[in-house]
Amino acid sequence: MALQENPVTIRLKSVKNVIIVLSGKGGVGKSSVSTQLALNLYASSPIARVGILDVDLTGPSIPRMLGVDGHGVHQSSDGWVPVYADGPEARLACMSVGFLLKNKGDSVVWRGPKKNGMIRQFLTDVRWGELDYLVIDTPPGTSDEHLSLLEHMALMHSRLSAVIVTTPQAVALMDAMKCLSFTRAVNLPILGMIENMSGYVCPCCGEVSNVFSTGGGEEMARKEGLRFLGSLPVDTELVTLLDAADLEKSAAVSDVQSFGLLQRYTATPSAELFKNIRTRMLEELDVLNTVTEGRVGIVMK
């Protein structure tokens, strides 16, 4: 049966996989996980094409983490041109409301309908082109942005999946359960769970301290029948790297042209750990894609 078409499916017809990154609460490092996921998918193949869409409208942080903060979005005859974090190679496309603000310190005070309209524009007006993966970084919890996103992409259910990010503490796991409940209610497939901030590795001696406990995410995944994709300790090198994106403009432009961000990221301890997470996630995605024909669509009530 031919896929029904609407403005979203027409625009995203050349996007093979859409991976939505979710978290039950704020402060668990969901955006840093989204950034690492995009970088790892990009590095998985010399021809992989990746997009990252930041729909955390009130707290957009992806542009800063990718080192493209302050760049503008240009209009073409075929829609908005996304910002390419890798410069001329144009294999890592990024779109965020952060590119549209006059001043990066401006607050976004929008009600639900305006948020809905902005997300629809991101999905219908951005010239994404051919992508192997579109990673979508969402706000914490399950709010207007999540409902709008799934409503607009409901006809693309065969290409949608999600990853849940949590930290080991009980309060974060409780909120992650609510997030999991949401995905089950709307029939959104889960590739697995990532436990972030699972211990702290001392940069001097390498000793691991379980500042926030550890293992809670893995235990929850086991109980709920989810694939545990892996755990990530607090990595001071990664924190410094993602925070250091707010550089002098001339330095930032030079960095993008050589995609020095990726080079510096691969030298962090997190990069090696995330390779294993990427491998497990792609295994789950392969399984999911083989059973696409039997999947029930996204349920919007």
Image (cartoon, rainbow, N blue to C red):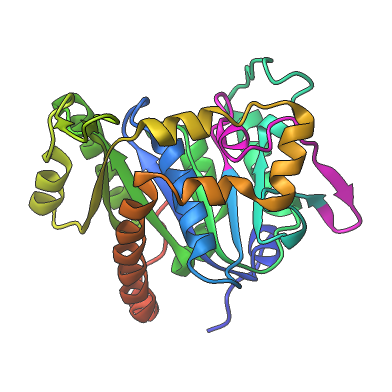
Outermost right residue: 77
Specify whether 4 is left or right of 106. Answer: left
Q: Nearer the viewer, residue 22 or 167?
A: 167
Horizontally, residue 78 falls left or right of residue 221, namely right
* Residue 131, position as x, y percentages in the image: 61, 66
- Residue at image coords 33%, 66%: 279
- Magenta extent: 54-79
Residue at image location 63% in from the left, 64% down from the top: 9
Residue placed most toward the observer, 232 or 264:
264
Q: Quadrant of residue 55?
A: top right
Residue 152 appears anywhere in the view: yes
Name the residue at 16% across, 33% down: 207
Overall secondary structure of the magenta section: loop
> In this figure, what is the number of numbered marks?
0
Name the residue rendered at 41%, 34% in the picture.
Answer: 237
- The picture quadrant where one finds residue 228 is bottom left
| Residue 8 image position (x, y, % from top left) | 65, 58
Q: Which x, y percent locates residue 230?
A: 24, 52
